[in-house]
Image: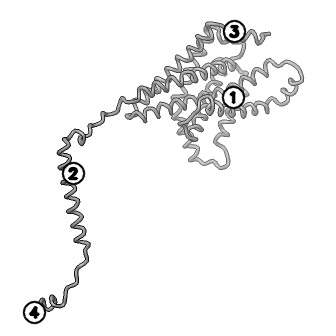
Amino acid sequence: MYTTSYYLEHYFHMPDFIIFLALAMVLMGIVFFVFYLYAKGTNKTDKKLEHEFYYLSERFYELIFSGGSIIGFMAAYYLINRFLTGGAFKAIWDDYKDYLLLVFMVISILVNTFLDHVVLRVKHLDEDAMASIRLTGMLYMIIIFGYIKFIYEDNNYDMFIAYFLTLMIGRFVYFDASFKDFLHCIKRAIANIPMMFMALAYLGIMCLYGYSTEYLLKHNGVITNIFFTHLFIIVAMFVTHFVAYKIVQGKACGHNEKPARPDRREVRPRQNRRVEDRENRREREIRRERRERVDRPERPRKQDEIEVMDL
């Protein structure tokens, strides 16, 4: 039986821990670079480039947070179900473990909210974008479970897959739903598919390296190792987030700005400006006199003037 000290010694063994974290940071840097190239290619102004880069980055954060928080409690459920062998809690677990799984899923939503509001604050996503990326996160998890079942050939997670399919169906089937809302959410979720494949490739490279070097222990279960890898990805996002944003702000500032034209009024001789001021003042006086002449009421004519006109 493996002890806690054994796992701590293994996962924090140097330099394996540093290498695994460095790999996560390098891959995160590549993701940022791809986002920057896309934002630069689709936006002409610096302000729009920055906003697009932040928008893409925060969608990626939310995808990892959504998948990682869910898979974390799936891993906790799996480890408890596997290693809990006796005691009073074992009887409670056997009777109510299905209900506790639902409780774990609710807690995962709270953890997701904590991650995107405290750890890395998501500021550029509206409610529709958040809902669509979380739906994509559920598809992200379904693909991971599909890999575990059909490629890794592990049948221990069939119940998890059934729960997730139920959640995805329940995401749309509710009483006040409309077909238009359904299509709108699906359309926005489809737009996140390329980003989802980037996240899967990121996760796949990390797991491939971890298993090839035996840094990820197979006897812990694949679901536990995937969650452990997500932890490294989240740490890498947190560390590289501030550096990447500073670099993008530095590259965006001043590259596309046109030089300001000199103020011609300042380079003209002072005497010319005085002559122009006098001419402008005279023109204003003439216009004012014309307005007064037009607005002036007609003077009543005297009686003798009227008689002369009659003659």
Question: Which of the two marks, 4 or 3, is nearer to us in this view?
Answer: 4
Task: Looking at the image, tell me whether mark 2 or mark 4 is earlier in sequence order.
Answer: 2
As measured in the structure, the alpha-carbon distance from the residue carrying label 4 to the one carrying label 3 is 127 Å
Residue under numbered circle 3:
10
From the top left corner, tell me how far across and down residue 303 is, in percent: 18, 90
Look at the image and tell me in which quarter the C terminus lies. bottom left
Give, as a three-letter code, the residue at label 2: Asp
Task: Looking at the image, tell me whether mark 2 or mark 3 is earlier in sequence order.
Answer: 3
Look at the image and tell me in which quarter the N terminus lies. top right
As measured in the structure, the alpha-carbon distance from the residue carrying label 1 to the one carrying label 4 is 114 Å
Among the 4 quarters of the image, the one containing residue 71? top right
Question: Which of the two marks, 2 or 4, is nearer to us in this view?
Answer: 2
Secondary element type, mark 1? helix
Give, as a three-letter code, the residue at label 1: Ile
Task: Give the residue at x 61% y 32%.
Answer: 116
Residue under numbered circle 1:
161
Residue under numbered circle 2:
277
Give, as a three-letter code, the residue at label 4: Leu
Is 309 situated left or right of 50 in this image?
Answer: left
Q: How is the image coloured?
A: one colour
Task: Give the residue at x 88% y 25%.
Answer: 91
How packed is label 3: few (under 14 Cα within 10 Å), some, or many (20 or more)?
some
Mark identifier at residue 133: none
Give, as a three-letter code, the residue at label 3: His
Q: Are marks 2 and 4 in contact (CB under 8 Å)?
A: no
Residue under numbered circle 4:
311
